[in-house]
Amino acid sequence: MPNSPAERPRRLSVQRKGPLLVEGPVEVELEDGSTVVSERFRVALCTCRRSRRYPWCDTSHRDRA
């Protein structure tokens, strides 16, 4: 589905050792075909799969002492 010319593109921020930050609201389709929605203005998506709230990041990627 193409974006309308009036819509601005979604901004994604990639961090080397962190989550993928997406300007929201977002709808994420999971591997099993289900979808999850967040209406927040910015969403952190887990890229390490350690999050207990996957696909949302809970900072489990951080090194723990």
Image (tube, rainbow, N blue to C red):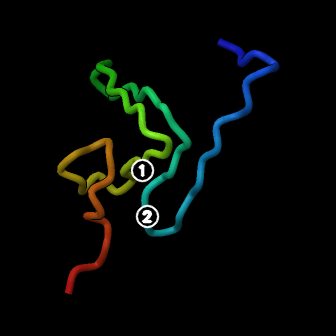
Q: Assess disc 2: are there few (<14), some (14-19) or many (≥20) residues with their C-alpha within 10 Å of its C-alpha.
A: some
Image position of 11 with respect to 27: above or below: below
- Quadrant of res 9: top right
Q: Which residue is mark 1?
A: 44
Q: Amino acid at mark 2?
A: Gly
Q: Position of residue 21 (x, y in %)?
A: 50, 51
Q: Assess disc 1: are there few (<14), some (14-19) or many (≥20) residues with their C-alpha within 10 Å of its C-alpha.
A: many
Q: How many marks are shown on the rendered structure?
A: 2
Q: Position of residue 54 (x, y in %)?
A: 26, 44
Secondary structure, mark 1, is: strand
On screen, residue 4 versus residue 36, left or right, reads right
Mark on residue 2? none
Given contact means CB atoms under 8 Å apart, are the residues at marks 2 and 1 in contact? yes
Residue drawn at x 75%, y 15% is 4
Q: Amino acid at mark 1?
A: Ala
Residue drawn at x 27%, y 57% is 58
Mark on residue 18? 2
Q: Residue furthest top?
A: 1
